[in-house]
Amino acid sequence: MKLSTRGRYGTRVLLDLALSGVKAPVPLKDIARRQQISLLYLEHLIAPLVAAGMIRSTRGARGGVRLARSPQEIRLSEVIGLLEGSIVAVGCIGDPDGCPRSELCVTRDIWGELKKAMDGVLESITLQDLVERQKGKAQSVEKMYYI
Amino acid sequence: MKLSTRGRYGTRVLLDLALSGVKAPVPLKDIARRQQISLLYLEHLIAPLVAAGMIRSTRGARGGVRLARSPQEIRLSEVIGLLEGSIVAVGCIGDPDGCPRSELCVTRDIWGELKKAMDGVLESITLQDLVERQKGKAQSVEKMYYI
DNA sequence: ACTATGTTGACCATAATGGTCAACATAGTG
DNA sequence: CACTATGTTGACCATTATGGTCAACATAGT
């Protein structure tokens, strides 16, 4: 049970975009270099984000990608949902008819609670939160170097 | 990102053992039949649980497996940990030197929080809790049939 | 026209998942 | 003692997910 690179890379890519703060399209090449992700892989990574209208892309020279919404309006739950599929995606949840003992099944309830706990965490964090945390961290590191 | 059958089957097997409440060894064959799990797969499933001393096995005729501890003392966090490995097992967590930017990485923190949330849920549930929930459910279903 | 980008679908290597098989070890039973 | 019912172990296998690459293409600037 683990988070794959998709969710992690994707989140970093979005944070990269949010931090740069520019409105102009950012070439994937730049993001790939900064985040140390293969460009070829990155192209596939962002496809679901583009499809979902979370980022907008521009082709051609001076093209690239940019956030389609403000960072306050992008929740990690949505990001992870797009890139990893449903968290704790147990077959018997969501498809109640899949399991004949769904009514009686206690363990099923547990996986549901687990999912809810994770959703809660991710729902509560927006891209803007990440940006602020990042800025805070960078600052404290700077201070450390001064001392 | 999903829970595999290992964690789910394993939990059901333990619940099965706890519900039967017998001290005598229960043959894997019986558990496999009740839980609809292939016997051959089940044998492999329980290996880590035996190795960890959560269940005890007896070979030979009239052998089988039984809980090595009381259900109050078995937490789901431990079960899932044994069967699925660490939840949200992101490489960069646990191995702080793996990632050069671990100090600065904000997303890393998020995965840590996610893990904590899940651990919290699983830590709080013991096998005994499952037993009681199950009994409650069975009862309410009975009532439904009476009406 | 040319070049710099993103898009798409095919392809591939590796590992994880879910499962089976066969050989073996061990404990009871007749 | 022979036999049978169990659990143990390691090899094996098919399918899918993961992580990635390649090549052909579409499109927008210069």
Image (tube, coloured by chain):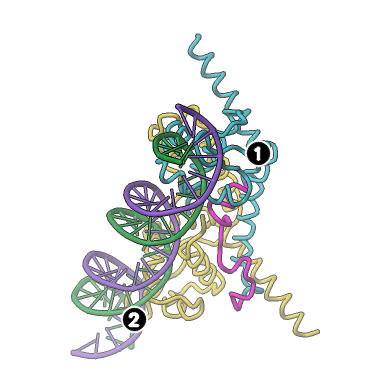
Chain colours: A yellow, B cyan, C purple, D green
User: What label does residue A61 carry, if any?
Assistant: 2
Residue at the image point whose x is 57% and y is 28% from the top: B20
**Chain at numbered mark 1:** B
Residue at the image point whose x is 68% and y is 36% from the top: B70
Residue at the image point whose x is 59% and y is 62% from the top: A128
Q: Is residue B100 magenta?
A: yes
In this picture, is D3 found above or below C2?
above
Between disc 2 and disc 1, the foreground one is 1
Kind of element beneath mark 2: loop
Residue A59 figure quarter: bottom left
Residue at the image point whose x is 67% and y is 75% from the top: A138
Q: Position of residue B92 (x, y in %)?
A: 59, 69
The part of the chain drawn in magenta is B77-101
Residue A100 figure quarter: top left
Observer-nearest of D15 and B110: D15
As measured in the structure, the alpha-carbon distance from the residue carrying label 2 to the one carrying label 1 is 59 Å
In this picture, is C15 found above or below B15?
below
Badge 2 amino acid:
Ala
In this picture, is A117 found above or below D26?
above
Residue identifier under label 1 = B126
Observer-nearest of A78 and B2: B2
Q: Position of residue C2 (x, y in %)?
A: 24, 90
Residue B100 lies left or right of residue A139; in this view the side is: left
**Magenta stretch, main secondary structure class:** loop
Q: Is residue B94 magenta?
A: yes
Residue density around tag 1, few if under 14, some if 14–19, many if 20 or more, within 10 Å: some
